[in-house]
Image: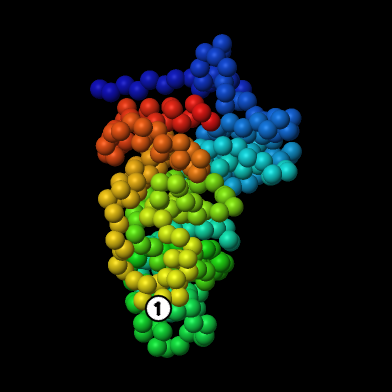
């Protein structure tokens, strides 16, 4: 025979501590206006109270419960006037108009291309938003639509700028610039978008003969150096601007591209924001070690690289 034992219900006003009373509960520490004035910043976890909803407005990454602004994602707390937001540590790219992005063509559709830009949904590159071979300025015709795969096809990499947004939130890209368009002579490296800071120019040329394109979506293109005259010449060359063939790259340049790419991977693994000075210092340190390029991906070598570079900054 099975017997069921009943237990008395606790009183409604009973308070049960989550741990020993002597331990300070960090979750109960909320932020006041004085903390924000001092530039107070810290990491927060989902469900952690941040501040009072009567004094501040909730932004992205937060919600209101019992007159408190509570974090809904793990990240850093940011404030703009009375608006409190939580910037997630790891998240998809959140585009803004004017952002420089590196993407990959995923599909060719009528009068448009679908582009993977590491966002919540694929971006759209309209046929009317690209330059014609030779820099011809005219309205796109039906014949241009039939030749869309000669411009971009599935798998092609490109650099573009966010032009606008559609009603469903998808971003519209354009490549109407001599510096935008199809990418060649390099390799793609992916890092979390939070590591890419907004700079005056996201086109960086390192002294080692390597060019970088830092896409704000976390896609970084590492390629051999091209002078301004070469870029302008290719832009007006009808065959070179949309060519799928890489140029001849010597062995020293290949090693430099691989070394810079591995340095970026190490920084991404250690969650270090990327800057041109930081990359240059890391490259010089890697050259001084006189080791193989693949050694940078070893854990001990990567830790030594990060410790050396961060100690100087």
Residue 150 position in % (x across, y down): 34, 77
Left of 99 or right of it: where is 53?
right
Asked whether residue 243 appears in the rendered view, the answer is: yes
**How many labels were placed on the picture?**
1
* Identity of the residue drawn at 35% across and 56% down: 186
Compared to 283, does 254 lie above or below? below
Question: Mark 1, residues whose alpha carbon is within 10 Å: few (<14), some, or many (≥20)?
Answer: some
Residue at the image point whose x is 45% and y is 75% from the top:
236
Q: Is residue 248 above or below residue 27?
A: below
Q: Nearer the viewer, residue 66 or 276?
A: 276
Residue drawn at x 56%, y 67% as measured from the top left: 163
Q: How is the image coloured?
A: rainbow
Quadrant location, the N terminus = top left
Residue at (34% x, 54% y) in the render: 187
Question: In the picture, residue 44 is in which quadrant?
Answer: top right
Identity of the residue furthest to the bottom in this view: 142
Viewer-proximal residue, 174 or 277?
277
Q: Look at the image and tell me whether residue 170 can be seen.
A: no
Q: Position of residue 276 (x, y in %)?
A: 50, 44
Question: Measured from the top left, where is residue 157 in percent x and y?
Answer: 37, 63
**Snapshot quadrant of residue 77:** top right
State the residue position of label 1: 238
What element does badge 1 sit on?
A: loop
- Who is closer to the viewer here, 194 or 304? 304
Residue closer to the observer: 161 or 227:
227
Q: Position of residue 123 (x, y in %)?
A: 46, 65
């Amino acid at each position: 025979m099975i017997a069921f034992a009943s237990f008395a219900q606790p009183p409604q006003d009973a308070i049960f501590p989550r741990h020993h009373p002597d331990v300070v509960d960090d979750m109960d520490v909320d932020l006041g206006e004085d903390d924000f004035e001092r530039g107070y910043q810290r990491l927060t976890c989902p469900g952690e109270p941040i501040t009072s909803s009567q004094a501040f407005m909730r932004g992205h990454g937060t919600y209101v419960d019992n007159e408190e602004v509570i974090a809904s994602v793990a990240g850093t707390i940011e404030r703009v006037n009375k608006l409190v937001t939580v910037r997630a540590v790891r998240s998809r790219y959140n585009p803004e108009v004017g952002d420089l992005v590196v993407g990959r063509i995923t599909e060719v559709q009528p009068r448009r291309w679908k582009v993977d830009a590491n966002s919540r949904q694929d971006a759209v590159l309209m046929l009317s938003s690209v330059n014609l071979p030779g820099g011809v300025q005219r309205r796109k015709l039906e014949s241009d639509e039939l030749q869309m795969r000669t411009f971009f096809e599935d798998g092609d990499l490109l650099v573009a700028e966010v032009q606008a947004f559609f009603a469903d939130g998808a971003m519209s890209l354009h490549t109407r610039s001599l510096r935008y368009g199809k990418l060649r002579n390099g390799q793609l490296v992916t890092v979390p978008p939070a590591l890419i800071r907004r700079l005056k120019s996201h086109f960086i040329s390192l002294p080692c003969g390597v060019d970088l394109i830092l896409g704000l979506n976390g896609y970084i293109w590492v390629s051999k150096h091209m002078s301004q005259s070469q870029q302008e010449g290719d832009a007006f060359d009808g065959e070179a601007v949309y060519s799928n063939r890489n140029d001849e790259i010597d062995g020293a340049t290949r090693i430099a591209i691989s070394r810079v790419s591995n340095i970026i991977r190490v920084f991404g693994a250690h969650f270090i924001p990327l800057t041109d000075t930081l990359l240059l210092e890391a490259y010089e340190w890697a050259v001084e070690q006189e080791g193989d390029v693949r050694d940078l991906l070893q854990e001990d070598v990567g830790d030594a690289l990060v410790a050396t570079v961060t100690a100087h900054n």
